[in-house]
Amino acid sequence: MNSLRRPGPPCRVLPNGRLPELFQWWLECEQASDLTLYGRKLWEAMSSYWPTGDQQPDATPAEIEFARN
């Protein structure tokens, strides 16, 4: 079984409460897979983010790429 925890220093939290390492990690996981399946609740939560996630003024490079992926 694969663990979702990766070794290394703890993630840093931005003042807005986001974890930039989380977006980078998830982006790398998605790019390494041929198919990503989302459950209904996650899809509903993220579907409002994806269309404009790359246009947010405080978006990190990883968040921009994640939104466009």
Image (cartoon, rainbow, N blue to C red):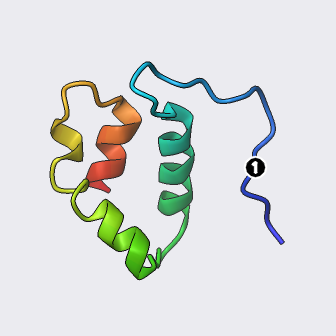
Q: Note whether 51 is above or below 22 in the view shown.
A: below
Q: Residue at x 33, y 44 (%)?
A: 65
Q: Position of residue 9 (x, y in %)?
A: 76, 26
Kindly give the residue lying farthest to the top in the view shown: 15
Q: Position of residue 63 (x, y in %)?
A: 36, 40
Q: Quadrant of the N terminus?
A: bottom right
Dot 1 falls on a residue whose secondary structure is loop
Q: Quadrant of the C terminus?
A: bottom left
Q: Amino acid at mark 1?
A: Arg
Q: Position of residue 41 (x, y in %)?
A: 41, 74
Residue indicated by mark 1: 5
Foreground of the two, 61 or 10: 10
Q: Residue at x 55, y 62 (%)?
A: 32
Left or right, residue 30 beside residue 67: right
Q: Residue at x 56, y 58 (%)?
A: 29
Q: Note whether 22 is above or below 44 in the view shown.
A: above
Left or right, residue 63 beside residue 4: left
